Image (cartoon, grey):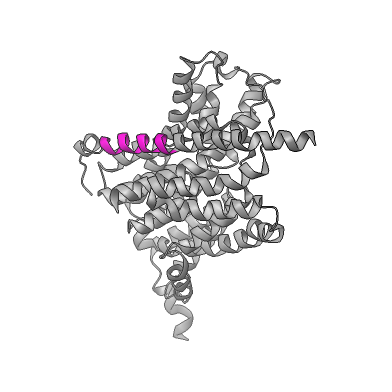
């Protein structure tokens, strides 16, 4: 096991890519849920009225 | 007669140390009730595999090859976990998912930190301790063929149990009393059954398209959730939540212990892995809280930054901790629905993070 401090900086790109990736995926999921809620909401209101 | 004493003569002091470690895990499970479903079998298994000339290892090795080496047990366990999760609070306010994303920061920070000491595959396997999710940690460590699976598992499950001790000091350090008192009134909205059914399907497709390595984990989690939400498979849902989850947990815990042989476990790398695991949990908490504070700079309706800490995937503990801390500061501030929504989103985000880690390094 060797101590290689420069590896921290070398691997920062994975931190950037990883966090960006998670935010993008979660962002797409959030948008999908917003769309789902909007699409199914009117049907829910109609059923409530009945 | 020789058979009665040859094991005693062949005893290595390191095996005795592993018995003590196993005993400590059992003590923590029973007396302190820290993740007893995992720590007790792991503790007992650690004793079992560290007996000299033990016959127990063969049976456990068979189980290990049948269910852990091929990642089968953690994936099946995810069916049970998916069946237990109610995504309702999250679906009423999907924007909360962003905090689940932020709270995975500790994984990637620890990846950088661990890479200073370990090769990149081992560093990535250690980093995934920050997912605060046992099955994800096992799957990633196995796929990356890490040689430290035992230490990673013990660290992951121990720190999940220690979340009530780890998180509050970090949250208090990063927030002011005024911030901790920010109220977040809960406006209940109904979510249609159609949305609850489509949600697991939609996120499986999304994960499959953008993070394909996460499909196994996401898919089994969402399959369990779909069984729960469809409304026509109540007996399967109950089986998944109780019998299946408990059965797999029994095998998982005791089988993980095969990686805790004294010659593998008692190394300086194990201590370092335990330290890095703690770093992962600390920076997960910090990432979620600081992101919430950052968003508050731009939002008129402020969020209580503590809910960022609930984005760690230790479900439901992290959500409850944030709620309790909120009540302590202001007995009228009920953060539970928000914190549980964020906590549940952390489950999804941690699996996505695991998929991304596999995508980078497989």
Rendered location of residue B65, percent (x, y): 42, 70
From the image, give the main secondary structure of the stretch colored magenta: helix
Does residue B164 show up? Answer: no
Q: Residue at x 29, y 39 (%)?
A: A14
Which quadrant of the figure has residue B10?
bottom left
Task: Locate residue B203 relative to residue B242 in the image: left or right.
Answer: left
Question: Where the C terminus of chain B falls, by quadrant?
Answer: bottom left
The vertical placement of B253 against B120, above or below, is below
Residue B325 included in the magenta stretch of the image: no
User: Where residue B293 appears, x then y in whole percent?
Assistant: 47, 20
Question: Which contiguous range is marked in magenta?
Answer: A12-25
Picture layout, residue B243 above or below residue B121: below
Task: Please give the name of the residue rendered at 33% of the width and 54% of the height, measured from the top-left corner.
Answer: B267
Q: Quadrant of residue B131?
A: top left
Q: As rendered, which of B307 and B85 lies closer to the eye?
A: B85
- Is A23 part of what is drawn in magenta? yes
Image position, residue B80 (x, y; %): 59, 56
The residue that appears at 67% across and 33% down in the rendered structure is: A42
Against A22, is B3 above or below?
below
**Of residues B75 and B134, which is closer to you in this image?**
B75
The answer to whether B315 appears left or right of B140 in the picture is right
Q: Is residue B149 visible?
A: yes
Q: As rendered, which of B5 and A28 lies closer to the eye?
A: A28
Q: Position of residue B63 (x, y in %)?
A: 48, 70
């Amino acid at each position: 096991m060797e101590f290689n401090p420069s590896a921290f900086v070398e691997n920062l790109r994975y931190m950037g890519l990883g966090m960006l990736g998670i935010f993008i995926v979660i962002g797409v999921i959030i948008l999908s849920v917003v769309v789902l809620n909007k699409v199914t909401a009117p049907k829910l209101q109609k059923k409530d009225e009945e | 007669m020789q058979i009665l004493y040859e094991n005693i003569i062949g005893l290595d002091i390191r095996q005795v140390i592993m018995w003590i470690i196993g005993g400590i895990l059992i003590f923590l499970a029973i007396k302190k009730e820290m993740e007893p479903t995992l720590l007790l079998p792991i503790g007992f298994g650690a004793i079992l595999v560290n007996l000299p000339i033990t016959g127990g290892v063969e049976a456990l090795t068979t189980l290990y090859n049948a269910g852990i080496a091929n990642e089968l047990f953690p994936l099946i366990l995810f069916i049970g976990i998916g069946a237990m999760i109610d995504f309702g609070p999250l679906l009423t306010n999907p924007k909360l998912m962003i905090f689940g994303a932020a709270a995975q920061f500790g994984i990637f920070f620890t990846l950088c930190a661990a890479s200073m000491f370990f090769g990149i595959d081992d560093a990535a396997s250690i980093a995934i301790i920050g997912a605060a999710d046992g099955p994800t940690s096992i799957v990633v460590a196995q796929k990356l063929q890490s040689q430290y699976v035992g230490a990673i598992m013990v660290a992951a499950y121990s720190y999940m149990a220690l979340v009530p001790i780890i998180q509050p000091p970090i949250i208090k350090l990063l927030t002011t009393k005024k911030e901790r008192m920010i109220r977040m009134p809960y406006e209940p909205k109904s979510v249609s059954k159609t949305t609850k059914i489509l949600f697991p399907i939609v996120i499986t497709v999304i994960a499959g398209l953008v993070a394909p390595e996460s499909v196994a984990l996401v898919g089994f989690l969402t399959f369990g959730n779909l069984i729960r939400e469809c409304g026509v498979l109540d007996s399967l849902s109950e089986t998944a939540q109780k019998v299946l989850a408990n059965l797999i947990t029994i095998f998982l815990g005791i089988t993980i212990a095969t990686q805790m042989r004294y010659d593998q476990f008692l190394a300086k790398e194990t201590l370092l892995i335990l330290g890095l695991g703690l770093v992962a949990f600390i920076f997960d908490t910090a990432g979620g809280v600081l992101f919430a504070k950052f968003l508050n700079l731009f939002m008129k309706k402020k969020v209580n930054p503590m809910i960022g800490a609930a984005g760690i995937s230790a479900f439901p503990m992290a959500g409850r901790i944030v709620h309790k801390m909120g009540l302590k500061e202001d007995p009228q501030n009920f953060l539970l629905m928000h914190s549980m929504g964020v906590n549940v989103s952390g489950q999804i985000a941690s699996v996505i993070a695991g998929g991304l880690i596999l995508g980078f390094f497989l």
